[in-house]
Image (spheres, rainbow, N blue to C red):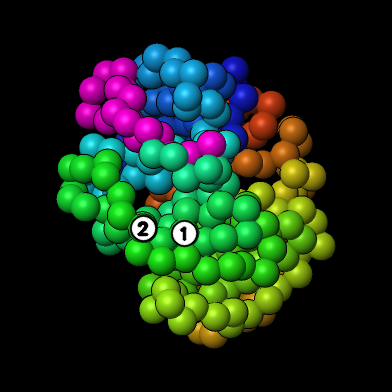
Amino acid sequence: GVFNAMSCLVSDLGDQLFVGGESGKLVVLDITDPVNPLYISESVTDSRYFRARDLMKYPGSPLVYACTATGVATYDVSTTPPTPVDWFDTTRCDAITILNSTLYIGSSTTLLVYTIDTLLSYRLSLAGSYTTPGPIRGLSIPHPQSTIYVASGNYYDLLEISDPSKSHNVLHTHTNVSTMKIVCSATTCFCNAVTSELIVDTVDAAGTYVNRNELALTGDGQWGFGIRGTLLYTCQGDGGFYVLNISNLPY
């Protein structure tokens, strides 16, 4: 791997992996054969875009949102290579996730809630915001979809988001390592750490963790996630990524 990636994302169909590379490039890999990814293309460098800290695709549209140090970049991935479409200034963007037509952006200690105007549009309208317990590094919306997990340093929080104006903290869980990104289902949370550890928490219906496993990985930290079926892709800060079999976990 030569992409020095901080983020990765599996496509809607599970056949491509988008990687946030250096100098604002969005790299596209063919993962039809999951353990033998093939390079397809990469976007042109744009000085505004920087390296993507997080990636999120709007399901059913060709748009990928890239979270960067100064805002959100939008790429059209229906073209080869991906085409930079527009830039949205949010001052800073540390993490991003999406639910239906709502985009959640972590900006330092504030969770910004934006409405996407139309399916094929990159235009965003601010719908609300609230302060989080710590600086946001990762976001994940599990099922049920009225809550959001927020990774913040040495812990993660479960927040109620059924009404952005009334969001509140439901759960506070220590990880004991500095977590960067998080991805959760109703039963499992994966947290990656700058110390190259992968934390796997089994959670109950209330979001409280029941059991914890830790997997030591080599490399310069694990910075981003992508999941395809029973495979988990975790990107490394020094280039490349792991492909992990999670079939034995209740994800």
Asked whether residue 84 is drawn in magenta, I would say: yes
**Residue 127 image offset from top left, x and y in percent:** 35, 64
Q: Is residue 156 visible?
A: yes
**How many discs mark residues in the rendered view?**
2
**Magenta part of the chain:** 70-87
For the point 23% across and 37% down, the residue is: 62
**Residue 61 image offset from top left, x and y in percent:** 21, 43
Considering the numbered disc 1 on the image, is that residue within a helix, a strand or a loop? strand
Front in this rendered view, residue 97 or 249: 97
Considering the numbered disc 2 on the image, is that residue within a helix, a strand or a loop? strand
Q: Label the magenta part by its dominant secondary structure.
A: strand
**Residue 55 image offset from top left, x and y in percent:** 45, 41
Q: Residues within 10 Å of mark 2 (few under 14, many from 20)?
A: few
At label 2, which amino acid type do we have?
A: Leu
At label 1, which amino acid type do we have?
A: Leu
**Residue 141 image offset from top left, x and y in percent:** 45, 65
Asked whether residue 55 is drawn in magenta, I would say: no
Front in this rendered view, residue 20 or 92: 92
Q: Residues within 10 Å of mark 1 (few under 14, many from 20)?
A: many
Q: Which mark is residue 126?
A: 2
For the point 47% across and 54% down, the residue is: 105
Q: Which mark is residue 112?
A: 1
- Rounded to the nearest whole Å, what is the CA distance between mark 1 and mark 2? 7 Å
Give the side of residue 99 with respect to residue 119, left or right: right
Quarter of the rendering occupied by the N terminus? top right
Pointer 1 or 2: first along the chain: 1
